[in-house]
Amino acid sequence: MIVGPASQILGVRIAQELGIETINTETKNFPDGENYLRLNLEDESILQGKEVIIIQSTGPSANSTQNSRLFELLMMIDSVKRIGPEKLIVIVPYLAYARQDKIFRPGECPFARVIARMINSQNIDEFYTVDVHNPQILEEFDCKAINIDSMELLANYIKSLGAEDIVVVSPDKGSIERSKAFARYFGESVPIEYFEKKRDVITGEIKMSGELNLKGKDVVIADDIIATGGTMATAIELSKQSGAKKVYAAATHALMLGQAKYRIMKAGADEIIGTDSIDNEMAKVSLAKTIADYLAYD
Ligand code: R5P
């Protein structure tokens, strides 16, 4: 397994689950800003005719951008392809640009599809991602392309914290189906409520509304992504105003940009929970076994 710079923890964990070797990478930026990546190996023949897995998340972090992560991914893919594996499997736990999946204003580009086409054009054999914002973009792949669901893992973790009398709250009516599926992991009769969220397509500002009866309840708010934390913080504030006792803020991809941690804690979260799709301190739930199971049995 080639472990990309953005998935060091998850990559090694998956390799350990599968009992396979790992190869690290060496990266830098040239003085003009261009990315550089080489596979950290001296003998390329160790990849020839082998099944090779590449893992690289493409989220932004304090020391990199999503564009750099995508370029590093393409460099890894091309290096492996040049060497000649029998099969190449690519795992991108967090797929950058996935939220640019529609034309919101005239003249825009649904760039999520371009990113998907770009990866697909490398003639890979299988592609895996996790809770991608809009699974329809996987239509751009000619090869097998799987969107892995992390909801059961997140729910199990929240149950282990002792949450009781749970209500699942969707921060957006549009993601109610996802919240319904999520709620089932807490039990058949767990209620699902939602707020109405509207985002200004020009400023990005969100407005959320809704009055729910959450008196004395443990509220779980789940989203695919926490970016600036605005969506989650607003949903938490409204939940608290509606009487919530505890609030668990869960997201598959907790990017935690800027002041996100402060905003969410200040709004009244008891805990912020993410997965190791993103290497940061919110990664309390590991995707390793679930991804390894897909790779082993598919
Ligand atoms: C939006 O549709 C997503 O599902 C998330 O709700 C959104 O990306 C979160 O962004 P932020 O944390 O900046 O509000």
Image (cartoon, helix red, strand yellow):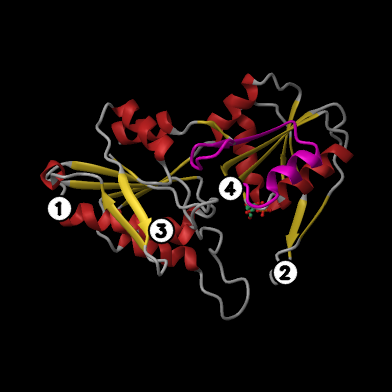
CA distance separating discs 1 and 2:
46 Å
The question of residue 259 being in magenta is answered with yes
Residue closest to the eye, 238 or 82: 82
**Which quadrant: the C terminus?**
top left
CA distance separating discs 4 and 1:
34 Å
In what element is the residue under mark 2? loop
Q: Is mark 4 within 8 Å of ligand 1?
A: yes
Amino acid, disc 1: Ile
Image coordinates of residue 104 in percent, x first then y, are 62, 71
Question: Going from the N terminus, do you reach mark 4 or mark 2 first?
Answer: 2
Discs 1, 2 touching: Cβ within 8 Å: no
In this figure, which residue is indicated by the disc labeled 4?
255
The crowd level at tag 1 (other Cα within 10 Å; few <14, some 14-19, many 20+) is some
Discs 3, 1 touching: Cβ within 8 Å: no
Residue closest to the eye, 92 or 239: 92
Amino acid, disc 4: Leu
- Is residue 142 visible in this depiction of the protein? no
In this figure, which residue is indicated by the disc labeled 2?
203
Question: Going from the N terminus, do you reach mark 1 or mark 2 first?
Answer: 1
In this figure, which residue is indicated by the disc labeled 3?
70
Q: Residue at x 14, y 52 (%)?
A: 84
Question: Going from the N terminus, do you reach mark 3 or mark 1 first?
Answer: 3
In this figure, which residue is indicated by the disc labeled 1?
83
Image coordinates of residue 103 in percent, x first then y, are 57, 71
CA distance separating discs 4 and 2:
20 Å
The crowd level at tag 3 (other Cα within 10 Å; few <14, some 14-19, many 20+) is many
Amino acid, disc 2: Thr
In what element is the residue under mark 1? helix
The crowd level at tag 4 (other Cα within 10 Å; few <14, some 14-19, many 20+) is many
| Image quadrant where residue 168 sits | top right
Q: Which residues are magenta?
A: 256-281
The dot on residue 119 is: none
